[in-house]
Image (cartoon, rainbow, N blue to C red):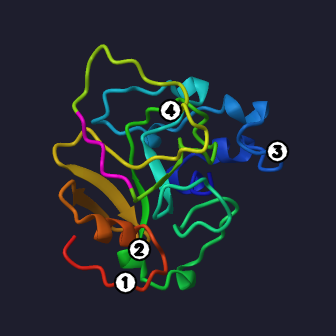
Amino acid sequence: MQILPQLGHRALFRDYDFAVGASDSTNFLTETPGDYACPSNPYKINQLLGEGGHYAAVHHDVEAPIDVNNSGVMYLNSSIRPRDIDDGTANTLMVGETHGEFLLPWGSGSAQTLRNTSLPFDTGPFTPNATVPVKPENPAFVGGFGSFHNGVVQFVFVDGSVKSLSIEIHPTIYRQLGHRADGGPVDGF
C-alpha cells in the first residue's frame, strides 16, 4: 500500500482508509493495480473487485502464522528499516512471485500478500480448466512462492535488485534469504 504513489497510483493511495484496515468494506473493493499482476501468470485477477495480485512480501523464513515476531521484512505491523536488516539488503528477500491462487483482497496482509521461504517453489504447469481456490483451507497456513516461469521464481531484494531464483536453490540458502538477521552466510544463489 505504501508504495502506491511511487507506482503512479496516488488516487488509490488517497482513497485507501488506513484507519480501518484492508478487510473493511471501504477498502475491499479498491481497484487492484495492474502492476501487481504478472504478465506470465495465466490466472487473471479481477482488478475491479480488488482481488489480490501475483506478488507477495516475505514475512518469515518458516511456515508459521503471520505475527509481530516473524523474521522477514514485512509481517504484522512491521516497520523494518534498512538498518534493521543485519544480513544486508542485497542478501534479504522482500517480494516474490506467487500464483495468486487465493482470491483475497490485495491489501489484506494475509496469505494473499505475505509468504514464507520454507516451502519449495511451486512452478507447476498451468491447467487451462483448473479452478482457483477462493481461500486457503487452513486460515493459519501462509504458504510459499511460485511462478509459471520455467524453472525460476522472480524476487525483489531489499536493495531493489530483481533476481530469478532457480527452483534448484538449496533449501537452507533459500530460508536464509527470507530471514533478515540470521547471520548465516549466503552464497551460491
The three-letter code of the residue at mark 2 reads: Asp
How far apart are the two marked residues, 1 and 2, measured between alpha carbons?
18 Å
SS assignment for the magenta stretch, majority: loop
- From the viewer's perspective, tell me whether residue 69 is left or right of residue 8: right
Residue 19 drawn in magenta: no
Give the quadrant of residue 6: bottom right
Q: Counting residues from the N terminus, which is met first, the one under dot 4 or under dot 3?
A: 3
Q: Counting residues from the N terminus, which is met first, the one under dot 2 or under dot 4?
A: 4
Image position, residue 110 (x, y; %): 60, 45
Question: Marks 2 and 4: CB-CB under 8 Å?
Answer: no
The single residue placed furthest to the top in the displayed view is 129
Residue stretch rendered in magenta on the structure = 119-124
The three-letter code of the residue at mark 1 reads: Gly
How far apart are the two marked residues, 3 and 2, measured between alpha carbons?
31 Å
The three-letter code of the residue at mark 4 reads: Phe
> Mark 2 — residue?
159
Element type where label 1 sits in the image: loop
Q: Determine whether 105 is above or below 159 in the image.
A: above
